[in-house]
Amino acid sequence: MRVVLTADADALPPLVLEAPLPDEGRRAIAGEWWYRAWAERDSAARYARLHAAMQALDAPQNLIDGCRRAGFDEVRHADICAANARRFEVPDPFADRPTPAAPLGRGDLSARERLLYEFTAFGCVTESLNASLLLETHDRATEPGIRGAVHGLLADEVQHARLGWAWLAWSGQQGDVGWLAQHTPAMLQAAASRNLSDSEALCARWALPALGYLPQADRVAIFVRCVVEVIAPGLARFDVNPEPMLDWLEAQAWV
Ligand SMILES: [Fe+2]
Ligand SMILES: [Fe+2]
């Protein structure tokens, strides 16, 4: 299912637009793709850090290898997103933005707990949301280059989510993971701001599913559906109570 694209914008087909796209719209959609390129670079840095931390624990080799592969995937994703963004001929507003890939979770967690927190927050939650968003984006994108780019990301993001669930499963065999439940609202909060808040104003005006830019209402619907149908049941399967997460979701004004 993987589509290999190069980072060379010249290798991608020219943009195929169904209607003229004014400068502001061009900047909005290019900005979305540039933002994705930055987020992929940040994810690559995160997986590199997680890979090093996993090696310090007695973790299964297949999970360590999976994390290493995920890091390489994210580097390739960043190239794909940047190549797509370049087709809009708009400079990268995130070119100088650092990629801190800051550790997630409270600082008082042990190294093992911190790793479990991060794989749950980033793998089970964020990567599952990424995969759901990309699936719908792919279904609705009609511009050939963008559809190909999304196709190239989608299968990998599904694998990255699986890595998170596999880490949770393995951790559950080593000891109690139920303590994660109290942290799930914070995990969702962080994922929501990453998925839903960025470029909100421009999104409301320029969302064009044909170009891989979904309207805010659709993003919210995808987010809620993924939490209720994928993430909450997945957590429950590994004895992490999903109720705090679902209560948080229900309390959000934007739902
Ligand atoms: Fe990615
Ligand atoms: Fe990913």
Image (cartoon, rainbow, N blue to C red):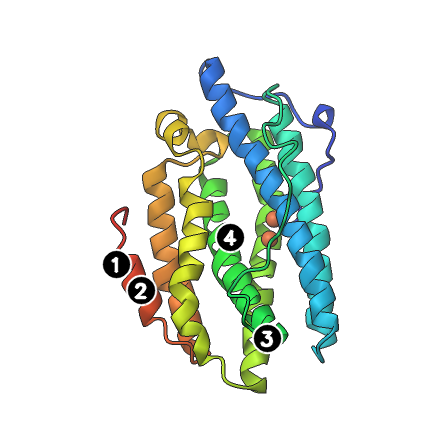
Mark 2 C-beta closer than 8 Å to ligand 2: no
Q: Nearer the viewer, residue 127 or 98?
A: 98
Q: Are the two marked residues, 4 and 3, in contact with CB atoms closer than 8 angstroms? A: no
| Mark 4 residue type | Ala
| Mark 2 residue type | Leu
Q: Which residue corresponds to mark 1?
A: 250
Of labels 4 and 2, earlier in sequence is 4
Question: Residue 72, percent across and down?
Answer: 73, 52
- The number of numbered badges drawn on the structure is 4
Q: Which residue corresponds to mark 4?
A: 131
Find residue 62 and name its label. none
Q: Is residue 120 visible?
A: yes
Q: Are the two marked residues, 2 and 1, in contact with CB atoms closer than 8 angstroms? A: yes
Distance from Cα at disc 4 to Cα at disc 1:
22 Å
Of labels 2 and 3, earlier in sequence is 3
Q: Secondary structure at mark 4?
A: helix
Of labels 1 and 3, earlier in sequence is 3
Distance from Cα at disc 2 to Cα at disc 1:
6 Å
Q: Nearer the viewer, residue 123 or 176?
A: 176
**Which class describes the residues within 10 Å of circle 1: few (<14), some (14-19), or many (20+)?**
few
Find residue 246 and name its label. 2
| Mark 1 residue type | Glu
Which residue is located at x 36 percent, y 71 percent? Answer: 242
- Image-based side of 241 in relation to 162, left or right: left
147 w.r.t. 205: above or below:
below
235 w.r.t. 72: above or below:
below
Of labels 4 and 3, earlier in sequence is 3
Q: Which residue corresponds to mark 3?
A: 110
194 w.r.t. 240: above or below:
above
Mark 3 C-beta closer than 8 Å to ligand 2: no
